[in-house]
């Protein structure tokens, strides 16, 4: 079956079930009250005229709505889902809080760290980010090492992979928050895929198979579809050090959950929020905007469109969406894999396992050591892991962890969800130099905010907040000039 056919079937299943992907009768509940808790309201529910309408109540939209409201603007946020948080989603497995979407944060991510401090939130750790035991598939067999030895080998391989200039790639992104500063060099490496780069460096097989899953998980798809320059940008975010990159991307979580942060931002914003309100159209005429939804129409002087790039094509814009944004949305960013939590009967300690594409599990590591076994978080970038097939998950996991006995599997269908149509952003070849700037540009009085087009931590919660802060400031400055 083709990848597109699998996506269509998955989306149909999602629309039929309108729930989380479940295996072994494990139910993932929507957090009741996440969007309904009382917060200050500026306008009455019958009002239809606003200064700013924000489409989407993920972290980009929530931040933009809050910041616009704090500047005295009358703001309406419209969210298609019945909850806030976008591509983050907190649930529980027995006694343990699990993050089914975006998860990890770090103090090197400046925008999310500011918000964590602003609202007095705290951190907790993922044990598997620093494994004692490491296993990886190479040449169709399993190889194991202690964590320290495996990371020493991974460091050697990643350094060689990213060292395009004799300076570990530093000349490509001398300032990571300004990704196009060295445009011509960036464009050179934006033309090749991750697989193309691997062929250039001639690693021995065991190192190649150890390295490949680490960039495959970033693209969250076949690495032949991802731009090599995107990996160099991730590398720059880790200060050109694989240990720092691991620490910043997969170690620390918000103890109160991503929902705790989303709710704190929402409660701090004096704006009106309507959930369960998918936007169908945005019409711009004579400087006035009309936003249409099944529940009615709303007007504003400015609109902030804070939805994933993959979903822009599903809203009717008049005049039509600009060609750069439309092309990027139609092509989509790459992330379409799965993330799932797997409870196994065995106690395995602090463990990590990886396998190169197209193995059904790309990356897996210990999430929680339990009295009744171990909870593992698994990522599939091949699109071949059926999280509803417990026996299939068990078979794939046994290729990394022989003898594993699966109790249950918990996941959420981000690619089938019509309001995300994928996971996090990683660009295809050419998209950074061809589409990134255009994705950020306003079209008349329509502004665009998304983690998918952030300057620094693109694809992360931090990038979403960065984008929301930037866009709210842009809207305020431009509306002030018109006043």
Image: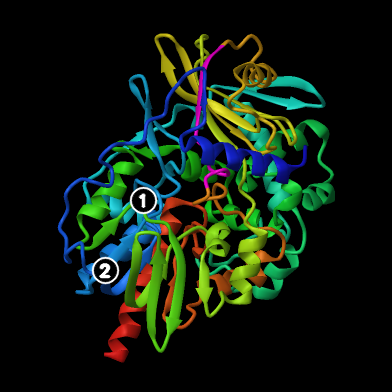
Q: Nearer the viewer, mark 2 or mark 1?
A: 1
Colouring: rainbow
| Residue that appears at 64% across and 48% down | 219
Q: Nearer the viewer, residue 435 or 188?
A: 435
Mark number displayed over residue 75: 2
CB atoms of marks 2 and 1 within 8 Å: no
Above or below, 266 relative to 390:
below
- Disc marking residue 456: none
Q: Secondary structure at mark 2?
A: strand
At x 62% / y 45%, what residue is drawn?
A: 336
Label 1, on which residue? 276
User: Circle 2: is it few (<14), some (14-19), or many (20+) Cα within 10 Å?
Assistant: many
Does residue 276 appear to the left or right of 206 in the view shown? left
Crowding at label 1, few (<14), some or many (≥20) Cα neighbours within 10 Å? some
- For the question of whether residue 171 can be seen, the reply is no
Span of residues in magenta: 406-417
Quarter of the image for residue 66 reads bottom left
Residue at horizontal 58%, vertical 44%?
A: 415
In this rendering, position of residue 289 left or right of residue 396: left
Question: Where 59 sits versus 281, above or below?
Answer: above
Badge 2 or badge 1: first in the primary sequence: 2
**Residue 361 in the figure: left or right of residue 224:** left
Q: Could you say where residue 301 lies in the image, as x and y percent from the top left? A: 33, 80
Q: Indicate the position of residue 481 as horizontal and vertical percent values.
A: 31, 90
Q: Nearer the viewer, residue 173 or 341?
A: 341
Q: Does residue 389 appear in the picture of this structure?
A: yes
Mark 1 secondary-structure assignment: loop
**Residue 22: image location, x then y, percent:** 50, 26
- Coordinates of residue 16 in the picture (x, y in percent): 53, 37
Comparing 453 with 152, the one in front is 453
């Amino acid at each position: 079956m083709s990848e597109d056919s699998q996506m269509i079937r998955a989306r149909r299943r999602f629309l039929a079930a309108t729930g989380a992907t479940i295996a072994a009768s494990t139910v993932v509940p929507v957090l009741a009250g996440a969007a309904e808790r009382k917060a200050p309201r500026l306008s009455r529910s019958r009002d239809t005229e606003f200064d700013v309408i924000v489409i989407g109540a993920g972290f980009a939209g929530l931040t933009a709505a809050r910041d616009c409201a704090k500047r005295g603007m009358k703001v309406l946020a419209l969210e298609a889902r019945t909850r806030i948080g976008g591509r983050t989603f907190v649930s529980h497995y027995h006694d343990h809080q699990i993050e089914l979407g975006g998860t990890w944060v770090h103090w090197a991510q400046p925008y999310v760290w500011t918000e964590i401090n602003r609202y007095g939130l705290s951190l907790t750790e993922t044990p598997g980010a620093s494994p004692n035991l490491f296993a990886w598939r190479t040449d169709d067999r399993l190889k194991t090492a202690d964590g320290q030895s495996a990371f020493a080998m991974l460091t050697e391989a990643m350094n060689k992979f990213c060292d395009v200039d004799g300076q570990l790639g530093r000349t490509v992104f001398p300032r990571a928050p300004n990704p196009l500063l060295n445009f011509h060099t960036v464009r050179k490496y934006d033309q090749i895929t991750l697989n193309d780069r691997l062929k250039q460096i001639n690693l021995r097989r065991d190192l190649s198979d150890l390295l490949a899953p680490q960039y495959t998980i970033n693209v969250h798809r076949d690495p032949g579809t991802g731009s090599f320059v995107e990996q160099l940008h991730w590398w720059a975010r880790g200060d050109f050090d694989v240990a720092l990159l691991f620490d910043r991307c997969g170690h620390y979580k918000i103890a109160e959950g991503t929902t705790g942060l989303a709710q704190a931002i929402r409660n701090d914003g004096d704006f009106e929020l309507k959930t369960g309100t998918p936007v169908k159209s945005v019409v711009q005429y004579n400087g006035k905007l009309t936003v249409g939804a099944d529940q009615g129409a709303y007007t504003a002087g400015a609109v902030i469109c804070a939805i994933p790039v993959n979903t822009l094509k599903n809203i009717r814009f008049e005049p039509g969406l600009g060609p750069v944004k439309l092309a990027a949305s139609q092509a989509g960013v790459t992330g379409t894999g799965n993330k799932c939590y797997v409870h196994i009967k065995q106690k395995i300690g602090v463990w990590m396992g990886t396998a190169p594409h197209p193995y059904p599990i790309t990356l897996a590591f210990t999430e929680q050591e339990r009295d009744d076994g171990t909870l593992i978080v698994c990522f599939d970038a091949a699109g071949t892991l059926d999280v509803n097939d417990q026996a299939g998950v068990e078979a794939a996991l046994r290729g990394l962890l022989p003898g594993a006995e699966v109790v249950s599997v918990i996941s959420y269908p981000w690619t089938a969800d019509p309001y995300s149509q994928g996971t996090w952003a990683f660009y295809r070849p050419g998209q950074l130099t061809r589409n990134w700037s255009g994705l950020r540009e306003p079209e008349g009085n329509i502004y665009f905010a998304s983690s998918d087009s952030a300057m620094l931590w693109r694809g992360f919660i931090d990038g979403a907040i960065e984008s929301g802060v930037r866009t709210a400031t842009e809207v305020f400055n431009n509306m002030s000039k018109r006043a």
